[in-house]
Image (cartoon, helix red, strand yellow):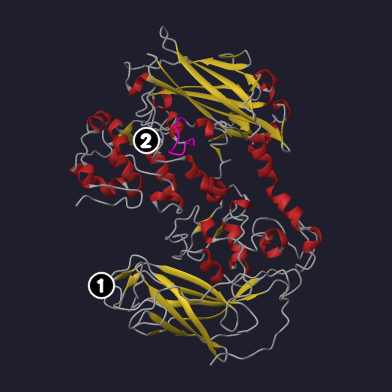
Amino acid sequence: MMNTKHTKIALLLAASFSVALTGCGSDGDDGKDGIPGLPGGEPAEAIQQLKLEVLSVTYEGDNPTLKVFATNEDDEAVVGLSAFEVKKVAQLIPAGATGAGNSAVWESIGSQKEFIDNKNGSYSFTIETKGFNSELTQRYNIIAQNAMLLDGVTEVPHTELSQDFDGEGYDAKYTKNIVSHDTCANCHAEGEPITTRHSSYFTQETCATCHSTNLSTESQWKHLIHNIHNSNKSFTDKNGKEYTGVTAEALIQNNCQSCHVESEELTEWGNWTRVPTMETCSSCHTGIDFEAGQGHPQQSDNSNCIACHNASWTEEIHTGDFVEKKALMDQYGINVDSTIDPTTQNATISIQVVDSNGENVDLNTISAMVQRIEIITNVGPNNVTLGYYGKDSINAIMNGVVDTKATIEGGKLVYTTSADLKLGTAGSDDETAFSFVGWSMCSEDGAFVDCSKVVSDENMNFSYNEDGTVKAKWLKDDFYTGMKADLAFATLSGQAPSMRHVDSVNFSACATCHTPEFEIHKGQQHAGFVMSEQLSHTTDANDMPIVGVDACVACHTPDGTYASGANQGAIEMKLHSVHGQQGVIKDCAQCHNDFNLDAFKLKGALASSVIEAYSDPGQKESLYTTPITATCASCHGFEEIKNHAQSQGGLVNGPYQEANDAAQLETCFFCHAPTIFDHTAVKM
């Protein structure tokens, strides 16, 4: 029978808790031979998508019986689930209930792997709980593992459901909804484990329910999730996997608002500013011992945190740097033009700085604040010909000083290439020279400053030769801001330039993880430039600019980058190999808008390895792979697909000429028909 306990324990269910109703009924049609109001008829014979719904929660004493209904994508009842469980039952202890200043927390009170299959799509779980309190919100975390039905034939996709109720089985009156699963899915692939390094679970609701107060502070979700997503600390998990925070820094740049996104649906999205605690803060802020008073005034609990750390101050201190950075980036942009002298066949690049209104800015007025303007010119956007070491590149301005090879004319920065561009015949891809310009400005305390004020040994990073002498030095990241980059094309004949396709990967897809203000390659090598609408040279069906990643091939050439083929530097491989290592990207559609398979018709061999890794730069002899094979192998492994690829006309890690001659002989697409939603698809 329904539990009738009504003790009404005062657990501070104050106005700060919002009503977040979760339904437990179904809108399905009345089914024959089924449950009234729900699908009936013959059970599902195939399951592409498993849908779970809690029909009811009833109680005998403190022990709930949960009735769960399972259907497939066609609303057909699913009978015969095997690997099915209530992973956790948790109840929500309200903020302040365990002590003044403490945040609301989930407390695990039970689980159940045994169930009754009612043979009509419904399943019953009776769960013995420990410490049940009917005054609290109860969460049921239900998981169907990727397994077969009892028939041993029908596969069931992994599915998770976390649903909240009040302590009597009705709609929950409050819950803890700070970060949505959809926000996590901006980076973590939907329908895939959040991290294969640690677990096999798909949703942050599952993670939050399991990582409850029953675990140590370091393992509780409020501490662990921040520890993983910032670069201030590293740790090793129970499986011996090391988390350094470097990946998170590269993705979300330690920006709280990458995850804590304002939302009308998440009534407590701003909780992170309103409820500061030692447990949460210590996950990012290292070197603090609250009880000993080291790095922070001494305190033994959270009762006085809010006295100093009020919500507005907490938000300002944690978001100020990013707000200031965006404001700086938006102050200026650049427009880049390029022309080729038909006599010398050199490209002349002119760079006009513009303000936020698009008005021209005389570079002389801000040049002292320019940390770097880097100009890189290469040839052949689709099949880059000059390679990494053959390209023309210059830091035309460095720390406020204009290079002697560049000039400021009429308020513009002007530079003429000196390398032999080796331009091809009119209309060919290698007749087009393209120039990528990245730049950055010296900055401090949220404002642009004269570079002479920040350029000092104290503010520099150093690298050293073996004899101890300084090899290179560069300004620390804190003292400059990457600005919006631009790209220009020019041809010798004056005909329309050749351009690389941008319909495969749009930078907007990158920005869902990295944010639009991501300063790419910030550090010793480059200016820390920002991808923006200025790099667009085409628009979509709605006339919106498409910002592709085609500018990256100025350096990420078929011949690789500084390590030749050793680091798989060609853009076709680099993005796959780097993102594959992160353990976050598991789905092509996370990055790709489409697959432009015709683009391979314009490509040659790609440097994929070296004969002797890491001899002197420029001296490594690369090994090459045909382009389709190299692209696939950057995810699937070169040795793993070698035999198959070479049986279909490809070549793996061979001499350049042989691989280049075979580049258009691969027959991969005779059988394979990859799409972003199923890259394993084949023609039948």
Can residue 562 be seen in this snapshot?
no
Tag 2 and tag 1, C-beta contact below 8 Å: no
Q: Residues within 10 Å of mark 2 (few under 14, many from 20)?
A: many
Say which element carries label 1: loop
Alpha carbons under labels 2 and 1: distance apart: 45 Å
- The label on residue 153 is 1
Vertical placement of residue 435 versus 73, above or below = above
Q: Residue 638: horizontal and vertical position, in percent?
A: 30, 45
Q: Is residue 433 left or right of residue 596?
A: right
| Chain part drawn in magenta | 537-545
- The label on residue 351 is none
Say which element carries label 2: loop
Q: Residue 42: horizontal and vertical position, in percent?
A: 29, 77
Vertical placement of residue 183 versus 216, above or below = above
Vertical placement of residue 517 versus 35, above or below = above
Residue at 33 percent of width and 81 percent of height: 32
Q: Which residue is mark 2?
A: 565
Q: Residue 357: horizontal and vertical position, in percent?
A: 64, 29
The secondary structure making up most of the magenta span is loop
**Picture quadrant where residue 489 is located:** top left
Confirm whether the magenta stretch covers residue 539: yes
Confirm whether the magenta stretch covers residue 82: no
What's under tag 2, amino acid-wise? Gly
**Picture quadrant where residue 301 is located:** bottom right
**Picture quadrant where residue 61 is located:** bottom right
Q: Residue 90: horizontal and vertical position, in percent?
A: 57, 77
Q: Earlier in the sequence, mark 2 or mark 1?
A: 1
Vertical placement of residue 516 versus 83, above or below = above
What's under tag 1, amino acid-wise? Val
Can residue 564 be seen in this snapshot?
yes
> Which marked residue is nearer to the observer: mark 2 or mark 1?
1
